[in-house]
Amino acid sequence: MTLQELEQSVLRLNQALLSPVAKKKASTPIEKYDVANKGYVDSRVGIEGRSHNPATTSIPINNNGSLINIDLQTNDFANGITWNSTFHYFSVVTAGRYLVHLSVGFGSEPITGGTSQFAAIKQNGTEVSRGYTLNNGVSGEVETAHVTDILNCAAGDYIEFFAGHLSNATVSIQTGSNLTFATISIA
């Protein structure tokens, strides 16, 4: 049996046994690389990126829930995906499903209890997901909003990251790679 016949046989077996999601992934054409004569690997593995906010950003008073682009100036890594350092978004190179996460740490300003802060993800300029945190009104507490989604992306799609609030004060977005950051990886 040739290598090509073996690959076709394995593909047919995968299609017969695996879940619908795995079937789709198994039937998707992939590039293969021989890794030190130890076999082949899926070239889609390892497509990932991470960026964070290195400087305090403020969201104005009473922005009525308007979304403000988060200034994720520091790109930690971008493997198999493109980071746009001017407008701070990821651009998809390889079509597929991507797991996207955004964490936004909001400052400890005196905010009226019961107001909310939120994090949002946009795909190609359209909001696709939003996550909230509800402030309890205790001054000095830092609140964090998270949002996670799986997005079906085509090559060339771009993923942006936003935040907003509904409160009576200017709210700062916290700095640091552990407080305000975005991640993306092929699912």
Image (cartoon, rainbow, N blue to C red):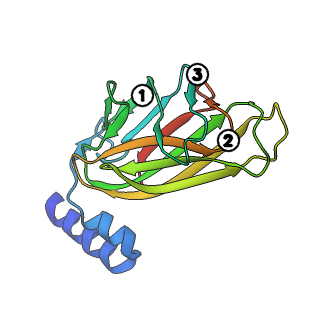
Q: Is residue 40 visible?
A: no
Residue 58 sits in which quadrant? top right
Instruction: Single out the mark in the foreground, 3 or 2.
Output: 3
**In this rendering, is residue 61 above or below 8?**
above
Of the two numbered discs 3 and 1 in the rendering, the one whose residue sits closer to the viewer: 3
Which numbered disc flags the more N-terminal residue, 3 or 2? 3
Q: Is residue 33 left or right of residue 70?
A: left
Position in image of residue 29 (x %, y %): 20, 58
Does residue 16 lie above or below 152 as drawn?
Answer: below
Q: Dot 1 lies on which element?
A: strand
Residue 130, image x, y percentages? 53, 54
**Label 1 neighbourhood size at 10 Å, few (<14), some (14-19), many (20+)?**
some
Q: Earlier in the sequence, mark 3 or mark 1?
A: 3
Instruction: Check disc 2: other Cα within 10 Å, few if <14, some if 14-19, many if 20+.
Output: many
Residue 13 is situated, as x and y percent measured from the top left of the image, at 31, 75
Residue at numbered disc 3: 56
Q: Residue at x 30, y 75 (%)?
A: 15
- Mark 2 vs mark 1: in front: 2
